[in-house]
Amino acid sequence: MRKRLVVSVLLLLSLVLSACAPAVPTADDAAAEAEKAVISFWYNPPSGGEGATCYQTTVIDPFNEMSDTIFVDAVAQPEAWNATRTALAAGEGPDIVRTPGPSFVFELAQAGQLLPLDDYVASEGWDDLFVDWALSLGEVEGTIYSLADELETLVLYYNKTLFEQKGWNPPSTVAELYELAAVIAADDIVPFAHTNAEWRPANEWHVGEYFNHVAGPDRVYEALTGQIPWTHEDFVTSVELLDEAQQNGWFTGGLELYYTLTFDDVRGMLGRGEAAMNIEGTWVAADLDTLYFTEENGGMEWDWVPTPSQTGDPIYTIGMGNTSSINRNSEHPEAVAEFLSYSFSPESQAALLRNCGKAPAPVRLTDDAMEGVDPRIAAIFIDLAAASDSGGYGYTTWTFWPPKSDAYIYEEIERVWSGDITAEEYLQGLDELFQEEFSAGAIPPIPERQ
Amino acid sequence: MFGSRRADSLVPNYVILLLLVVFTIGPLVVLVSNAFKSPQELIANPLGLPMRPTLANFPEAWRVGEFATTIGNSVFLVVTTVFVELVLTGLAAYSLARLNPPGQNGFMGYMLVGSTLPIWLFLVPLFYMWSKMGLTNTLYGLAILYVAFNAPFATFLLRAFMVQIPRDFEDAARVDGANEVSVFTRVILPLTWPGFLTVGLVVGLGVWNEFQTALIFTSNPKLFPVALSYYKFTSRFGRDWSLTSAAAFMMIAPVLILFLAMQRRFIAGLSQGGIKG
Amino acid sequence: MALNPEMASAAPVPPRTYVRSAAATRARFLRQKVVPWLFIAPILLVHFIVVIVPSVQSFYYSMTDWSGIGAAEWVGFENFQQMIFDDSSYRSALFNNVKWLLVFLTVPFAMALVAAQLLAPVRKGAMWFRTLLFIPYVLPSVINANIWRNLMSPRLGLGAQVAQWGENTLGTDQLAVFGTAFLGKTETALMSIAFVDNWHFWGFLMVLFLTAMQGISQDLYDAAKIDGANRLNEFIHVTIPGILPTLAFMMMLVAIWSFLVFDYVWILTQGGPANSSEVLGSYLYKQVFNRFEAGYASAIGLSMSMFAGIIIGIFALLRRRGWEI
């Protein structure tokens, strides 16, 4: 009796096994039939599930439909970068290699995992497509290995309705900002809707903004090019000012809340007027109207100003959301180049901005690119483009700092806030790591000051 | 409060156990009831039962999470892993419990030490080897990894179950002239059936819930396991907690059904196994 | 029940004659030395290939400066030197693992033993109790962690609601402490994670103990009764010894796991705030994927195994002293 039971369980198992063993994947069946060159592409789904489908339908599907010779097999995968690195180490990985920023390209290029792009820059006309400084961001020791995507910046968003009710003016200098924050806090309103609970590296948004807007982009440039150390007093002031805001409880009402509330929580607070301001990237702009400044939340309005600076001059820090390269082991490098040209084209970039709220790549957009985009959001990108031409720009940490220094910036700043270490000690540690990476050459080309 | 096995009052036992059940199950009730709320209701009423229950979250979560694909993959992974695991570790555990292999302490030490190596330590070399063997991006390759990762736990637990069986049963079989294989299949296996169920359950659940290894070793959405469906909802800018709850519900529902079904046999096996002596 | 003839012939048949002969000696050698290892070989092979071979490579990498990609540069024991003498983050992570170990060797064991003892005599509804208490263990860490992240939210969570209720209904701020953002304070983050992990884990221990308790012969309890033992004596002198193999074994596993903990820490705080909940597992992960110090990470990983190895050594020693583990 018992034996029969065992046997039947085994039978059942083998049945299940044979029934649900999925066929070994052979790229895409449709593509295989048409004998197209299949190129693989892994990327992080930008938000939830919808952002991923948006990218697929806006760029990848039209390309696959249009091309008779190429099929892009795109995979939206959480933690795509970790998977990419691991696969590259084994000489595998996708044909199109995406990294989180130019400074991450260095290591891959050094290890010989990426194809030099110089030939394609000429043949595909990328030198005309990209703005000048942007193309050189992809250089490692004089050779171009990557194309920068998602030109981002951070600005100060504020609840305009709330400001009007209270008679507050959007600040343009750091002094005004701190004066106003004190007034707002005294009114029992949260000055800044900031949090890092869902994304620890959000810390670096603030460190970077304080470096660029308190010490100033010239100082940052000098430090990034090794002329001055990070222990310079202007950086100490920057970190101490940031710490002051945290200790005052201006970020979301205190450190413990900053560490635990979700983005949804704090942006909701901004939309309902429970919080007044938020210094954050262009990535959030598209969500503000659709999710937070809604009728249900009271129908308030938002607007933005450049992040206040010490001098009052507007400074837009430049950031890259990610970069694209060609895998050295790709069997179809020409096909990858063709797809990259398509996806970086002004038309595709404009469509991505319109449909998905994705920040455009640093390419020369056509005049009608901003059509159909919220005028406030369009204004950010137009001002950013003007600033990047005129020199009114700064440097985001995840784009221009080498990887180890970058990780240090967002991991260790919490120890300043907790009182573990002083601002000087924090910068001392940063400087040690940075100089090590600097002498190894792991710094991307820094756009010069004008 | 330590109730004996006789006719003492069990009321204190029930009271304390009920409190523990509330502590244990309460959070899950919140999760399940949130799955039936609209996002608007969730904000107004994050902890209570749904006042206006809706099913709208489920088809949406099913579609976005691509559960149709991932559930099949996970079933395959679980069944393969558990089957291979039970066969291989069952044999090893039997040998350890009964056959006195020379150097068995060395082997147990080896298995224990093996269980202390964190995956992140050897991930890159392992991936390299797996890709050279053509096992990345296959469910079989992933299942082999799971078998190996769970081997120490499974071996030890099965051995512990087998050690408890009185030797008289086997000796009787040996006197009848049975060889080691038939002693194993005729005596040990039926008596340790609950042990196999427990191990199978634990390993199977571990595989169903696993996503970290899968994230690295598969890059084809057709091969993603069910945990990745859920993981999608929690990725860094995810925000819709009612949708996320629905996805969580769909991921855990099969587990709960299977667990509840197996639980009966698990207990029945215990009482009829002759172990209680 | 007839034996499958094929299976019977596949395994060596024990010799029926007791005459000492070369063939008999060989057969006995086979039976006593080789056959047991044939049973073990398959799983050993799989485990060796998947875990040990790459780990040996990592052992080499722990002696190098290596980013995880490309060439590794030999540096000897530099990584270990740095780890032991210069890295305060490593030390504080290790200290957190020790705290974790102490918590997990006490709280879940106490809860599980008490609950199992309470449940053992229960007949009516026993299965339901056992099933319900076990359920969190069967759920994935991502879901469990997210449930509790929401329950602990200082905005919409359970504690926040209690605090609000205290303020609005009772007019007291005595309950405000419940509204604390436990995961956001350096003093409480680690213990909050341990709380969540334990919530999901203790029921598993309970079921194992209960199963072991049901394997204890009723005669032993009867004998204890005759000797006039009260219930506590029964528990200490019959139940505990009866489940000692399971108990000791689980203590060892929990101790080992305490040095390897990663999941719940990573999902809930990623080691923060200000490294206050950093454990070796999360520190290792950051070294691999944030800092690209795969060589250094290998050294950390090996040290984790070493600590776990020390635990194993302690238990092996106890075993040698006659403990039945």
Image: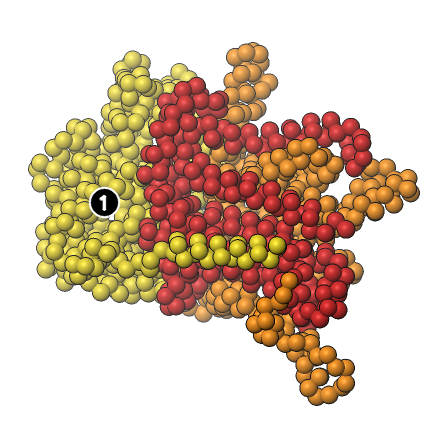
Chain colours: A yellow, B red, C orange
The quadrant the N terminus of chain A occupies is bottom right
Residue B76 seen in render? yes
Expressed as whole percent of the image width and height from the top left, the position of residue B132 reads 37, 68
In the rendered image, which quarter is residue A36 located in?
bottom left
Expressed as whole percent of the image width and height from the top left, the position of residue A401 reads 33, 49
Residue, far bottom: C22
Within 10 Å of disc 1 (Cα), the crowding (few <14, some 14-19, many 20+) is: some
Expressed as whole percent of the image width and height from the top left, the position of residue B14 reads 69, 29
Name the amino acid, label 1.
Answer: Gln
**In the shown orientation, is residue C237 left or right of residue B177?**
right
**In the shown orientation, is residue C204 left or right of residue A285?**
right
Q: Residue at x 60, y 38 (%)?
A: C131
The quadrant the C terminus of chain A occupies is top left
Residue A417 seen in render? no
Q: Which element type, helix, strand or loop, lies under badge 1? A: helix
Position of residue C75 relative to residue A335, above or below, is below
Position of residue B209 relative to residue B23, above or below, is below
Expressed as whole percent of the image width and height from the top left, the position of residue A449 reads 21, 46
**In the shown orientation, is residue A407 left or right of residue A28?**
right
Q: Residue at x 51, y 60 (%)?
A: B84
Position of residue A395 relative to residue C296, above or below, is above
- Report which residue position mark 1 lands on: A56
Q: Residue at x 78, y 45 (%)?
A: C239
**In the shown orientation, is residue B257 left or right of residue A200?**
right
Q: Which chain does tag 1 point to? A: A
Q: Residue at x 60, y 50 (%)?
A: B198
Give C274 or B59, whichever is nearer the viewer.
B59
Give B204 or B170, whichever is nearer the viewer.
B170
